[in-house]
Image (tube, grey):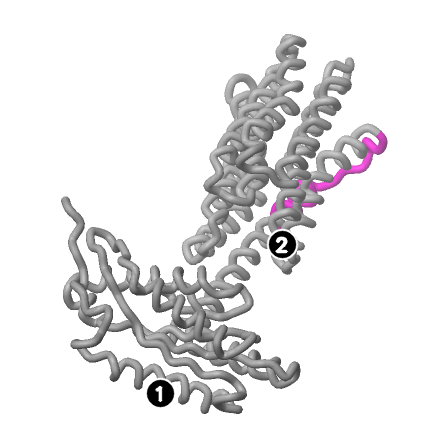
Amino acid sequence: MMNWNVLPDLAAVALLTCAFASTVRRSHSKSAGLWLIGWLLVAAHFASFLFAHYPGFIGKAGMYASTVTLVIAGVIFQTAVIPDQKEPSRRWMTTVLTAVNTLYMILLITGNPPIWALNATAALFGAGPLAVTLAALKRFNNAFRWATVLLNSSLSVFLLVFQNRPGNGSYLAFNAVLFTVFLGCSISFIFAYPRPTTGSVISIIGFINWAAVFVIGPWLFYYFPTIHVESEVWNLPKFVVAVGMILILLEGQIEHNKHLALHDPLTGLPNRRLFEDRLSNALDRARRTNTQTALLIVDLNRFKQVNDTFGHHVGDLLLQRVGALFLGRVRRSDTVARTGGDEFSIILEEPASRAEAMHVSHALLELLRAPMQLGNHTVQMGASIGLAIFPEDAAEMEQLCIVADQRMYDEKMQRTPQNRPEAVPLAKPLPS
């Protein structure tokens, strides 16, 4: 017969999954798509559990499906936030945990499985993650990976000790696996979000309570069998986690919008608004410490000709390459910003002297004079740079910018076609 008691929970999870899907479409999080798959599996868990009380094959299939979908959802939540998502061992870890958890739960639900099969699968809980971790150790190594190994190894030892106990061994093993999966989710979120936010804290608390269900439930069943707890109470942590994850995605979207407001979308460099704020702060620090600050304004020569000759896609590649070259040349404490179409501004904090700032200026010019391969073209550029030193050239931010800009303009005017050193062929197509 149908287990209609699950229907309200199924409806609630379905609505939350729809809300989650709507949030995922606007999200830039790499984990969002996997989280959505996880919640679809949770919805499938409730849908399958509707049939779990049916007699015969239908009931057995419903129990298999409801258990397996819940376990796989937990593994996905656990591994979706692993750092460096391009790392191949991440997929291997997900595959190993999914396969071992699924196989073990199927063996338990089947009833009276061969002891050797149960023991071998229990051993794989520790051996599988350890093998993946050791295989990728030289390429990828972090604390969360070892926490996963420790957690699953502890589960492996527990299962080998208790799973064959007469009477309640299978029941303890079943709940131990689910407890470990969702405790692992809370640990993964702790590592993934070291700076707590409202969404991450709610998700972590939700996962801890979700895991606790598989400890408190059996404890009440054995020691207080007369106490009846409604299923909605046991399922509440799931809804808490869903709300927490939605908040994480919304927080990420807010941060992304803030980033777009302060950064150039093409190069990822600070835009004029953020540049002016950083320059103001740099000058304030220089006043307090009685030090210097240098401002460089760089204007690319003949950038319009690149766009007109080869198209805007090549011009975009050029701007991205120039931004990357500049970032690689200055210190991390300095600022490289794109403040115009082909104009870059650089803040050098606390240069030792004007000579040091000029040395950086000349180094940037040399970088730009080297041929750059952009798509199927090799482009050779040049630039005009204006340098101004605070407080020697100007004591206020606006005047400092004017001085640097004027010097850049004067240098550009001096570069006539007859004496311009970069008056070489603009670009040479690569041989096909």
83 vs 227, left or right, is: left
Instruction: Work out whether residue 222 or residue 374 is closer to the camera in this orientation and state it.
Output: 374
- Kindly give the residue lying farthest to the right in the view shown: 223
106 vs 337, left or right, is: right
Instruction: Work out whether residue 225 or residue 367 is closer to the camera in this orientation and state it.
Output: 367
In the rendered image, residue 61, in percent from the top left (x then y), is placed at: 52, 22
Label 2 is placed on what type of residue? Ser
User: Looking at the rendering, in which quadrant would you find the N terminus?
Assistant: top right
Segment colored magenta:
223-240
| Crowding at mark 1 (Cα within 10 Å: few <14, some 14-19, many 20+) | some
Instruction: Work out whether residue 412 or residue 155 is closer to the camera in this orientation and state it.
Output: 412
Residue position marked by numbered label 1 in the rendering: 406
Residue at x 56%, y 20% (from the top left corner): 103
- As helix, strand or loop, the secondary structure at mark 2 comes to helix
Q: Is residue 255 magenta?
A: no
Cβ atoms at labels 1 and 2 below 8 Å apart: no
In the rendered image, residue 213, in percent from the top left (x then y), is placed at: 71, 38
Asked if one can make out residue 340 in the rendered structure from this viewpoint, the answer is: no
Residue at x 80%, y 37% (from the top left corner): 227
Q: Quadrant of residue 96?
A: top right
Label 1 is placed on what type of residue? Gln
In the rendered image, residue 277, in percent from the top left (x then y), is placed at: 51, 79
Residue position marked by numbered label 2 in the rendering: 200
Asked if one can make out residue 142 in the rendered structure from this viewpoint, the answer is: yes
- Vertical arrangement, residue 274 with respect to residue 376, above or below: below
- Vertical arrangement, residue 71 with respect to residue 376, above or below: above
